[in-house]
Amino acid sequence: MTTLNTFDSVFRSADKPVYELGRIEVSRVLVVTDMSDLEAEPLLAGLRGFLSVLGEDLEWRHVGGQTYGNVGELLERVEAEAPDLVVTYRHLQSEAWRWPHGLGEYLDVLSQVTKFPILVVPHPEADRAFPHTIANTDTVMAITNHLTADSRLVDYALRFTARAGTCWLTHIESQRQLDYFVSAVQKIPEIETDDVRELVAAQLLKEPRDYIASCRREIEAREEPLKIEAIVAMGDRIAEYRRLVEDHRCDLLVLNTWEGGQPAMQGQAYSLAVELRSIPLLLL
């Protein structure tokens, strides 16, 4: 490597993103169901307890199944309410919740069209939730493969973590993508590839570790009443997150649904939203 290239690499490695805490304000919560107001009351009562971390002065609104007849009408209702948070579940107005597949047409469109964060809770009738689900938010996990660019995601994860709770910041690099990259590089004779796998893997994992360390320093400096834990690893993302959710008895997962300005929910987020049905998911 030339001296210039060496200098450039050192300069770039020193240019690290540092986390700065942003305040997330939630005052209006809109719950969307396919029930009547009376039928939805047990769910609403459970949600009020589950989201007590957000404060006691929340304005709660309910959009029941009798108030919209199609996706367009639901979108109009949500936009008119302009909530800080939408809460709903899979397969609105459908019996497809009986099968563990998909999100249903209403949530599919809602998650990709509206600008509001959406909290997706287990379907009330599906009986797939973990026993600790919708009890509290003592354990929150932010899951992403681009953690160093996700200050907003970290802000939301921290905001939804209960006082004295634990917020897990996680970053799982794809082992499959690393293998593909290394295989391609090894076919270029001009590049020395003896150590490429170890060097690239180490760098990919170093950046999120450094960023999480900056998150911990920020939280400790502000004396926020919660604990930051880190998981940075290489592996199969879907399998790893499924295991982490169960191992750590997570109460809430926080994830981004959009990436790079694309018009649809990014593939990993959609797969996770479909697969992880036993606890609430906060889709940003």
Image (cartoon, grey):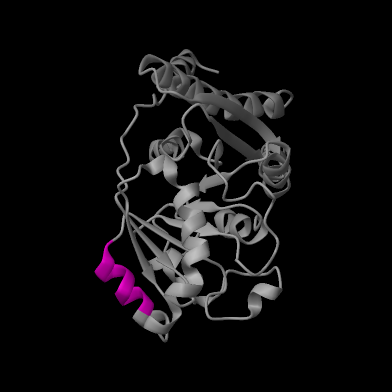
Relative horizontal placement of residue 165, taking residue 244 as reference (left or right): left
Residue 191 appears anywhere in the view = no
Q: Residue at x 57, y 32 (%)?
A: 168
Asked which quadrant contains residue 188, the reply is: top right
For the residue pair 267 and 164, the one nearer the viewer reads as 164
For the residue pair 59 and 250, the one nearer the viewer reads as 59
Asked which quadrant contains residue 245, the reply is: top right
Relative horizontal placement of residue 66, taking residue 135 as reference (left or right): left
Magenta-colored span: 74-82
Q: Position of residue 99 (x, y in %)?
A: 71, 73
Residue 72 appears anywhere in the view = yes
Residue that protrudes farthest toward the bottom in the picture: 69
Q: Position of residue 129 (x, y in %)?
A: 67, 56
Q: State whether residue 228 is above or below residue 144.
A: above
Q: Residue at x 64, y 70 (%)?
A: 125
For the residue pair 16 and 92, the one nearer the viewer reads as 92
Relative horizontal placement of residue 166, taking residue 278 as reference (left or right): left
- Magenta highlight on residue 125: no
Relative horizontal placement of residue 263, taking residue 204 as reference (left or right): left
- The tally of labels here is 0
Q: Residue at x 73, y 37 (%)?
A: 247
Q: Position of residue 197 (x, y in %)?
A: 70, 29
Q: Residue at x 59, y 44 (%)?
A: 251
